[in-house]
Amino acid sequence: MTYPYHENRIHGTSVFHFQVYSQYDKDGFYFVSQHWHEELEWIYVESGMLHLTIHGKSITLKEGEFCFINSGELHEIKSVSSSFHHAIVFNPHFLDFTLYDTCQHNFIRPITNGNLLFPTSFSVFSSKDREQVLFHMQEIVKLYRTNAFDAPLSIKIHILEMIKLFFQKNYFLKNTIFFKRKDSLNRLKQVIEYIYKNIAQPISLQALAEICFMSPNYFCYYFKQEIGKTPVTFINEYRIEKACEMLSESNLPVSAISLSVGFDNFSYFIRKFREYKGITPKEYRLLCTK
């Protein structure tokens, strides 16, 4: 499963811009490629294990663990075994008050304007606070599923309780991305968009480096620092994920799928597919049709 690089879908409804996505993956093939969106995304794992890459840092979440993805952060999500997780997604401005007051100024505005960031990893929390955060997340998911009349109000109360805890315990992080770094990150996002749009064609490091106005050698270093893997690995992984989509959604021959996702060497495609998925393309197709 892959999403577009810049996800701009509407989450929730026109009167409640908030949504919870629950994902059960029985085979360990769940994958959301590198993308970003304006919304905040809070993830907690109910069972199994997830591997995430957020702003170039690798995080493994096990049962009962959670993480926070801030607005605009590049991130990737994948599982390697059976898992069940929930993603709480909403725009930061969902928190705004119509009447500007001291609460809006001191606590909400720093979040919505990006001056404060939610901590990515659950590991920064004390064990007691970790339990409290997980409780709020679990309650939010339950409330969202009830469709009760007062559920939206209760959901907002739980979110605000979490924000209060973060301010009390100083868990928020100051956003230290300066304009120069922000510009280079925006160019990196253009690189990823270029890869997604040209996945069926040969992609050279030179072409990618030119988008960032860098030498190929420095670009490879920079890409690895920000994404958590080399450009070649990133391209191969995305090609394999596109092949997975086609294997599950079409009857095209495996050799034709290999070519359509940019592998001109069929043996290399089979080898890489097995490397990333642990099975052959034909075996993957059989699992998807069961």
Image (spheres, rainbow, N blue to C red):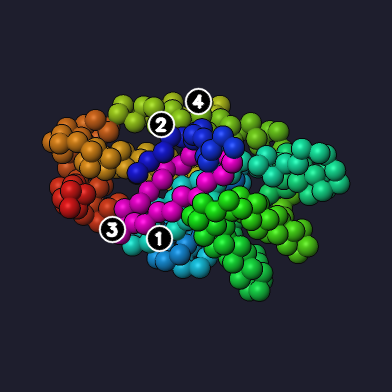
Whether residue 230 is in magenta: the answer is: no
- Can residue 17 be seen at all in this image of the molecule? yes
Query: Is label 2 or label 3 in front?
Result: 3
Mark 1 residue type: Phe
Of tags 1 and 3, which is closer to the observer?
1
Residue that mark 2 sits on: 195
Q: Are marks 3 and 4 in contact (CB under 8 Å)?
A: no
Q: Residue at label 3?
A: 27
Say which quarter of the image contains residue 135: bottom right
Q: Mark 2 or 4, which is nearer the eye? A: 2
Q: Residues within 10 Å of mark 2 (few under 14, many from 20)?
A: many
First along the sequence among labels 1 and 3: 3
- Give how far apart the Cα atoms at labels 1 and 2 are: 30 Å
If you read the primary sequence from the N terminus, does the residue marked by circle 3 or circle 4 appear first? 3
Which one is in front in this view, the residue at disc 3 or the one at disc 4?
3
Disc sitting over residue 210 in the figure:
4
- At x 28% / y 40%, what residue is drawn? 245
Q: Which residue is mark 1?
A: 84
Circles 2 and 3, Cβ within 8 Å, touching? The answer is no
Comes first in the chain, label 1 or label 4: 1
Between disc 1 and disc 4, the foreground one is 1
Q: Earlier in the sequence, mark 2 or mark 4?
A: 2
Residue 18 falls inside the magenta stretch: yes
Of residues 47 and 199, which is closer to you in this image? 47
Residue at 69 percent of width and 45 percent of height: 95
In the figure, is residue 161 to the left or right of 276? right
- Where residue 263 appears, as percent x and y from the top left, is 24, 35
Can you give x and y, in whole percent of width and height, for residue 11 in the image?
Answer: 52, 39
Mark 2 residue type? Ile
Give the Cα separation between the discs numbered 1 and 4.
Answer: 40 Å
Q: Position of residue 46 (x, y in %)?
A: 45, 64
